[in-house]
Amino acid sequence: MASARPAAQVNPAPLDERLRAARALSLELAAPLSPEDCQVQSMPDASPVKWHLAHTTWFFETFVLEPHLPGYRAFRPQFRQLFNSYYHSVSEQYPRPRRGLLTRPSLDEVRAWRVHVDEGLARLWACDPPDEVRALLELGLSHEQQHQELLLTDIKHAFAVNPLRPAYGAAAPRAVGEAPAAGWSRQAGGVVEIGHAGAGFCFDNETPRHAVLLRPFELATRPVTNGEYRDFVRDGGYRSPQWWLSDGWATLQAEGWSRPLYWSDDGARVFTLAGEQALPADEPVSHLSYYEADAFARWAGARLPREAEWEAVAAGLPVEGNFLDLARLHPLPAAATPGVRQMFGDVWEWTQSAYQGYPGYRAPRGAVGEYNGKFMCNQLVLRGGSCATPPGHARASYRNFFAPAARWQFAGVRLARDA
């Protein structure tokens, strides 16, 4: 049996140092924003920056400090419901589409709450917490990193709908050039193992590791570029129902889609976290829904990869790429290197795989069991991470998931085909 073993992602820094760094990074990401910026909610799928800062704090207070630090007192008991996202076994929740109406607590009070919780975490760490609590701290750290990416994609959407077209930050310099020609990497298939293995943290939905039979296939050596996707648009791709799934075509018509999110009408410009810029043809296309990725693949005479195919290729590759630490906050062109490129960073890559539990999967007991398992319906899997994903957060076995119509994340497309 062949074994596709994911590359280990083990950060050698002590857990308490990594936790402090993650908590500090959330505040750094919010620092360029005004209180008004941190309050806005541009659509039901997005959340205000203030809410992200509060909810990640709620997570540590609710799941770590209250049950495991003797004498800990909640900052404000009312926050237990106000900043609960979807944990029904904990409390009722404030309606998600109305989070932008929460003008109180103020941003300053949320920051004070973060200090209160961080002090509690320091006291807990000084008590040498048992492995059970350390596992919750690891989960909370990864949860905070997920919300750091959401913070950026949510504020990007909010700025995009503002007629002033404000910028979150300055554009990073980039070399101008052409992406290397797209190619195909042939894979023999066979029985491979996927799922998390070895040391390091993983989410429950990455387990258990199990065997999968793959038929021979080919995977594109890089993601699809803006230029290639623009050819699809100009060829009438958004006016031709034969390329679209039925639900996708219905969504396109209902939403009035005619191009990717953030593109100008003529496909010459694109809105970025640095404001509106010329659309570079050589960068990976991003902010596609699953429906758009699938339609492009059909038009191109290919298909989307299955998540097991994607992981079989990514396993063993170094988890390196254009992540949040590069501070570019935008996809970069593929480098002219041999082999499969950009499997990690730049853009999340849609797969054709439905988000469901692996064979033998069981959600953890208790409230944290609501973290992943309850969403295993009507979602599709994405792989690889993006330019807004914190470094050390991605790995070959990582399973991201979104509804097929979601477009506000840095999601792109890599083609596959049967061999």
Image: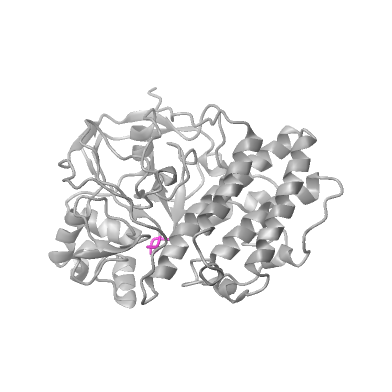
- Residue 286 at x, y percent in the picture: 31, 56
Residue 408 visible here: yes
Tell me the quadrant of the picture where the N terminus can be found.
top left
Residue 64 visible here: no
Q: Is residue 348 left or right of residue 10?
A: left
- Residue 130 at x, y percent in the picture: 76, 33
Q: Residue lying furthest left in this view? A: 235
Identified at 53% across, 66% down, the residue is 47
Q: In front here: 7 or 145? A: 145
Q: Is residue 319 above or below residue 353?
A: above
Q: Is residue 204 above or below residue 290?
A: above
Q: Is residue 135 left or right of residue 297?
A: right
Report the label total.
0
- Residue 121 at x, y percent in the picture: 73, 44
Identified at 67% across, 42% down, the residue is 136
Tell me the quadrant of the picture where the C terminus can be found.
top left
- Residue 33 at x, y percent in the picture: 50, 64
The magenta segment: 403-408
Q: Is residue 414 left or right of residue 130?
A: left
Q: Quadrant of residue 80?
A: bottom right
Identified at 38% across, 30% down, the residue is 318
Identified at 62% across, 41% down, the residue is 19
Please identify the dominant SS of the magenta region: loop
- Magenta span contains residue 2: no
Q: Residue lying furthest top in this view? A: 1
Q: In front here: 253 or 193? A: 253
